[in-house]
Each structure stands twice: as structure tokens, then as C-alpha cells.
């Protein structure tokens, strides 16, 4: 029996993985489930699991940063990720086990079988350090694009192709210049965390706007922006002065 900890910022992803493990493997004991990286770090150091399932793409602190902050590192690591390109190459080259989201049952069982066979509790050290360097180098090559996690896959979008983002509770819709839009199951603050503060501005609690797309400012029972596509966006009173200063500079 191996003791495992599940880490993912999306609770539904954790529930899905937990269901798969409980229903298809009698060799696993789940000793912790965390959506908070900070809580997960404490738990790993204290509980000292045999294996950790870790989502690498999380807001505020990604999986690589989490691993670098651990004092206990003697466990088998299985990365869960929506990446299907540059990161996967790094995982393969450094023999890091990984599962693509949405997780396939057969792939999951194979990963568990490898952990049971090895039971070597690999030390996360130089191997991961090398991988971090390779992934970060690859990510820099994509720095000109913004990553959007949509329906289990990553979409890379040029910042200037985004007109604005609109919040709806725990969901955010990203509107593009080509009239396409993407619904993302994350709060707007998480979706826009990687956006450049110099190019984008949150003009309202529900709207995050590409400043280069602003065509007009209209005062009519409040302040509104008119974007290149003709869309009007409300501006909150508290954001009015800062917005005008940003557009004037």
C-alpha cells in the first residue's frame, strides 16, 4: 500500500482523480487532498507520503515552485498536467512520471504500477533542478503568449488578440479580436494573473480590458469604454481616475 497526496487548484480535478484511485486501485491510500499549495507544502513535510500527484499549472504558486520549497523530498512524483508540448519533453528526458489531463484510467494504473514496482522513493534533487531549468527555458520562448486553460487543454494567445475578459462568478469569458471567445472555469483574478499590468487594466470588478483596444471614453450616466469592436465596457467610480491616467500616458 502506498500513501499518496493529491494537489490541484481545481477541486473537480482532485475529485476525479480520487474517484479513479478509489475505484480502480486497492494499492493506494489517499492521506491528503489540497487545492492550496501552501497547505500542501506543510502536509508533505509532515505526512511524508510515498507518492505525490501534483498539478504544475496553478495560480499564485505553480508546481515547480512548490517542489522547490519542500524540506521532505523522498517520494515518487507523478505530474498531472494539461501540457502536451515543451513540458512533456522535459518530463520524458528526466524520467519524471506524468499524466495528461483529463487523466486516462489505464495511464493512471500504469503509473501506480511503476511506483509499486520501484518503491525507491526517489530523491527530488538534481534531476528536478535540471528539469526546472529546461521547462523555464522553454517557457521563456512562449513568454509573448498568454496561456488559457480551456476544457482540459492549453491555448496560447497573443496578448493583443485579447479584447477583454468578463467575470461571472467562478467563470471567466475571454473575448478575442477574431470574435471568438473562451469560457474558463476560473475566477477572473486567476485567469488574468499572468497578464501584463502595463497592457491590461481591471476597469470594473467584472471586466479586465486590453488598454490598446480602447477606442473611446464616454460619459453617460457613468463612465464607459468603447472598444475597437464596438463593445461598451462600464468603468467603476474607483477605477476612473487611474484609468484616465493610464490611457493618457
Image (cartoon, rainbow, N blue to C red):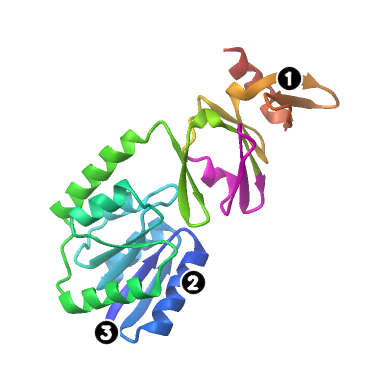
The quadrant in which the C terminus is found is top right
Q: Which residue is mark 1?
A: 217
Residue farthest toward the top in the current orientation of the protein: 249
**Relative horizontal placement of residue 198, taking residue 218 as reference (left or right):** left
The residue closer to the viewer here, 187 or 82, is: 82
Relative image position of residue 235 (x, y in whole percent) = 72, 30
Mark 3: secondary structure: loop
The residues bearing labels 1 and 2 have C-alpha atoms spaced at a distance of 46 Å
Callout 2 crowding tier (Cα within 10 Å): few <14, some 14–19, many ≥20: some
Residue farthest toward the bottom in the current orientation of the protein: 26
Q: Find the magenta span and give its range.
A: 167-193
Relative image position of residue 176 (x, y in whole percent) = 60, 35
Residue at 18 percent across and 78 percent down: it is 117
| Badge count | 3
Evaluate if marks 2 and 3 touch, with contact meaning CB atoms under 8 Å apart. no
Residue at 60 percent across and 24 percent down: it is 211
Is 174 situated above or below 125?
above
The residue closer to the viewer here, 235 or 103, is: 103
Q: Which residue is mark 2?
A: 15
Q: Which residue is mark 3?
A: 1
The residue closer to the viewer here, 148 or 89, is: 89
Residue farthest toward the front in the current orientation of the protein: 178
Residue at 22 percent across and 59 percent down: it is 71
The quadrant in which the N terminus is found is bottom left
Amino acid at each position: 500500500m502506498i500513501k499518496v497526496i493529491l494537489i490541484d487548484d481545481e477541486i473537480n480535478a482532485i475529485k476525479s482523480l480520487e474517484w479513479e484511485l478509489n475505484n480502480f486501485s486497492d494499492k493506494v491510500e489517499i492521506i491528503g487532498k489540497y487545492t492550496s499549495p501552501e497547505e500542501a507544502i506543510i502536509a508533505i513535510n509532515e505526512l511524508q507520503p510515498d507518492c505525490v500527484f501534483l498539478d504544475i499549472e496553478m495560480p499564485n504558486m505553480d508546481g515547480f515552485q512548490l517542489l522547490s520549497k519542500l524540506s521532505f523530498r523522498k517520494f515518487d512524483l507523478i505530474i498531472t498536467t494539461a501540457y502536451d508540448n515543451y513540458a512533456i519533453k522535459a518530463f520524458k528526458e528526466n524520467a519524471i512520471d506524468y499524466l495528461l489531463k483529463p487523466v486516462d484510467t489505464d495511464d493512471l494504473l500504469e503509473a501506480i504500477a511503476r511506483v509499486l514496482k520501484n518503491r525507491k522513493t526517489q530523491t527530488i534533487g538534481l534531476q528536478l533542478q535540471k528539469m526546472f531549468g529546461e521547462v523555464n527555458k522553454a517557457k521563456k520562448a512562449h513568454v509573448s503568449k498568454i496561456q488559457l486553460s480551456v476544457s482540459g487543454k492549453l491555448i496560447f494567445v497573443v496578448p493583443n488578440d485579447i479584447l477583454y475578459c468578463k467575470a461571472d462568478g467562478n467563470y471567466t469569458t475571454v473575448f478575442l479580436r477574431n470574435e471568438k471567445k473562451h469560457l474558463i472555469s476560473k475566477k477572473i483574478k486567476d485567469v488574468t494573473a499572468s497578464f501584463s499590468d502595463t497592457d491590461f487594466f481591471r476597469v470594473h470588478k467584472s471586466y479586465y480590458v486590453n488598454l490598446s483596444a480602447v477606442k473611446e471614453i464616454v460619459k453617460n450616466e457613468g463612465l464607459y469604454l468603447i472598444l475597437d469592436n464596438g463593445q461598451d465596457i462600464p468603468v467603476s467610480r474607483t477605477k476612473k481616475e487611474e484609468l484616465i491616467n493610464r490611457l493618457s500616458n
